[in-house]
Image (cartoon, rainbow, N blue to C red):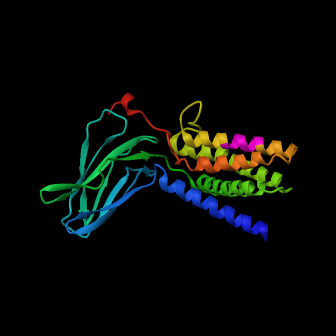
Amino acid sequence: MRSIWLWLISIVLAGGIMVYQRLTGPTTPVRGNVEYLGEKVSYKLLRTWGDDSGAGISVETTNKEAAGLVQYRRYNSHDEWKVIVLKNKDGVLTATLPQLPPAGKIMYQVWLFEKSKQVPLTEEPVVLRYKGAVPDWVMLPHILIMILSMIIAVRAGLEALKRNPDLVRITFWAMLTLLIGGLILGPIVQKYAFDAYWTGWPFGHDLTDNKTAVSFILWVLAYFIIRRNPQKRGWVLAACILQLAVYLIPHSMFGSEIDFTQTPQ
């Protein structure tokens, strides 16, 4: 019964941390609402796009007279701002941003027209990063195994609080799932998305790659140390805490990005 409760606690803690990471990451859509033409208009502006076409912008209203525009330019570039007029179809305003290669970023801001004034949806432009399409056969296992890795890591940390012969076995699985999900499937996903297997140290500054590597190294150390000396349970607890800490760092921070200042418009 105690083991079941520990697994349930692990699932809840791991789930909460992963939801937090998802909601605070740089790819989470920008959501909000504005007063426009006598109604409250809700919006969701994308910050990542993985289709083969340009990113779609959509703002739903109930007014067939609604109008607006999108101004945009490539992020990290010397481009001038360009404008796309939003199309109105039964009150839904839409536009398509230009397609960019994987890891290319575009910044855009949506404005709605109301009489003689323009209503911006956001105070600052939104930054969107393009990525390549990632097939389900690698994306789904990557996600599922990373979730499992987090759950097992928390379970190992809880087990380390009390002397238990199962600690070595659980630590091994925490190490193995992180290896498979983060350091084998993760680079494959990144290759499809951004045409690079690894953009962390020493080739780049991708925090997702770096934090995964650091966390894995500590799990390896913890496993071999407690395998030789089961009394040193603090290493497993430290590995668990580190993995929890690195998951609080938003996913995809300082990830792949094209420097358009070095490329023509």
- Picture residue at 83% right of the left edge, 55% below the top: 163
Does residue 136 appear left or right of residue 172 in this picture? left
In the image, residue 78 lies at what x, y percent?
Answer: 31, 32
Q: Is residue 110 visible?
A: yes
Q: Main secondary structure of the magenta part?
A: helix
- Picture residue at 30% right of the left edge, 53% below the top: 122
Does residue 260 appear left or right of residue 6 in this picture? left
Residue 149 occupies quadrant: bottom right
- Picture residue at 36% right of the left edge, 39% below the top: 75
Is 79 situated above or below 127? above
Residue farthest along the top direction in this orientation? 262
Does residue 137 appear left or right of residue 119 in this picture? right
Residue 144 occupies quadrant: bottom right
Instruction: Give the tally of numbered discs.
Output: 0
262 magenta-colored: no
Q: Is residue 90 visible?
A: no
In the image, residue 183 lies at what x, y percent?
Answer: 66, 43
Q: Quadrant of the C terminus?
A: top left
Q: Quadrant of the N terminus?
A: bottom right
Residue farthest along the left direction in this orientation? 116
- Frontmost residue, 229 versus 128: 229
In the image, residue 172 lies at what x, y percent?
Answer: 78, 50
Which span of residues is magenta-colored? Answer: 215-221
219 magenta-colored: yes
